[in-house]
Image (cartoon, rainbow, N blue to C red):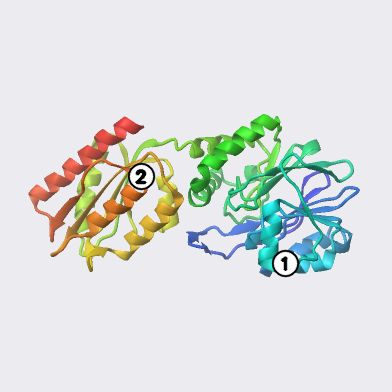
Amino acid sequence: MSVREIKENIFWVGAVDWNIRDFHGYSTNRGTTYNAYLIKDEKIALFDTVKRNFRDELLFHIKELTEPEKIDYLIVNHVEMDHSGSLPEVIDLIKPEKIFCSKNGKQAMLDHFHREDWPFEVVKTGDTISLGKRTVTFIETPMLHWPDSMFSYINEDKLLISSDAFGQHLATAERFADEVDQCDLFQEATKYYANILMLFSPNVQRLLAKVGELGIEIEMIAPDHGLIWRENPGIIIEAYDKWSSHTLCNKALVIYDTMWHSTELMARAICSEIAAAGVETKMLNLKVNHRSDVMTEVLDAGALVFGSPTLNNGMLPPMADFLTYLKGLRPKNQVAAAFGSFGWSGEAVKHINGYLEEMGLDLAHPGLRVKNVPREEDFAACRELGAAMVKAIRKTT
């Protein structure tokens, strides 16, 4: 990929990772980008770096614009290694006058790289620096999604360099959101929020309020992953407001795993009953749906029904995996229930209910267990569970 000018004398100089398919447990089927930005002014500033194995691509792009040694300032908005892995080598090369970062950012760099000699300049919300014709204002965004995270706002260009917020894991030859298929774009933006930022939704709400208080006008949002929002950036801000408010839809998910298909037969009966009531319903088998894709559906679903047979006095491993993943992302306001088949002990439903209660989800049904293969009366009980979910979801959406 080549350098792209996103505003006058402001350039994308990052890297495109076409081949990555796993991002610490999140499936990245469309790859990703590690975005870095360079501003040429009286002072030349580089915003973030890239994953270590993409260092040469970053330096190649910088050299198209200037000699790396001429970079004056390095702004580190986020220290996670996909944005800072090449930082030590880049700093040794460019020898910046100052490295601007949050207080937590300085500590994170010391913890990661153990370099006390770097020229750290700690900034806080509202602090500004002049590059010449341009001014950079810093906004701390702790726990979006690391303690060190911050935004950089270029006042004169109304450009928000937004670190890991408003991004997508999406590798493309294009650099702007309006240049790609909008369905793909928003599918990846939704997945990104559901799997990375949903946990921090209260912080997102506080951040949006803070931006309003500061009176910041935003004409363009340049995130650290994916495409840059240059036409109507308000559309992704509105989406974040909706997602972080836990606005739910009239939608139910039957999430399950099965051993000899008995639990799957139960899932089909439950799903059919819910769908017959006019509720959007999806069956998601954890053997064929990745946890991060299921999580994307969870983001706005009003009802969650979990099914697993009993294995060794517990649930099947994919269900335990997903519930652990879900618990970490702290879903809110959904109604839930559990079901499953068993041979002789039948503890899976009890264990699933335990997870749901720990997450604070509202149990719409005490749970349904069926021994071995369901009979007609068991299918009737499945339909009753489905009806209970319909009743509960109508109270919450």
Up-down relation of residue 144 to residue 275 (above or below): below
Q: Position of residue 266 (x, y in %)?
A: 19, 52
Residue drawn where x is 20% and y is 47% of the image = 269
Q: Quadrant of the N terminus?
A: bottom right
User: Dot 2: what SS?
Assistant: loop
Q: Nearer the viewer, residue 173 or 59?
A: 59
Q: Position of residue 238 (x, y in %)?
A: 56, 34
Residue drawn where x is 82% and y is 52% of the image = 45
Confirm whether residue 287 shows in the render. Answer: no
Residue denoted by label 1: 55
* Left or right: where 296 falls relative to 236: left
Q: Quadrant of the C terminus?
A: top left
Confirm whether residue 257 shows in the render. Answer: yes
Q: Residue 169 appears in which quarter of the rendering?
A: bottom right
Residue denoted by label 2: 360
Residue drawn where x is 21% and y is 57% of the image = 263
Q: Amino acid at mark 1?
A: Arg
Task: From the image, state whether disc 2 or disc 1 is nearer to you.
Answer: 2
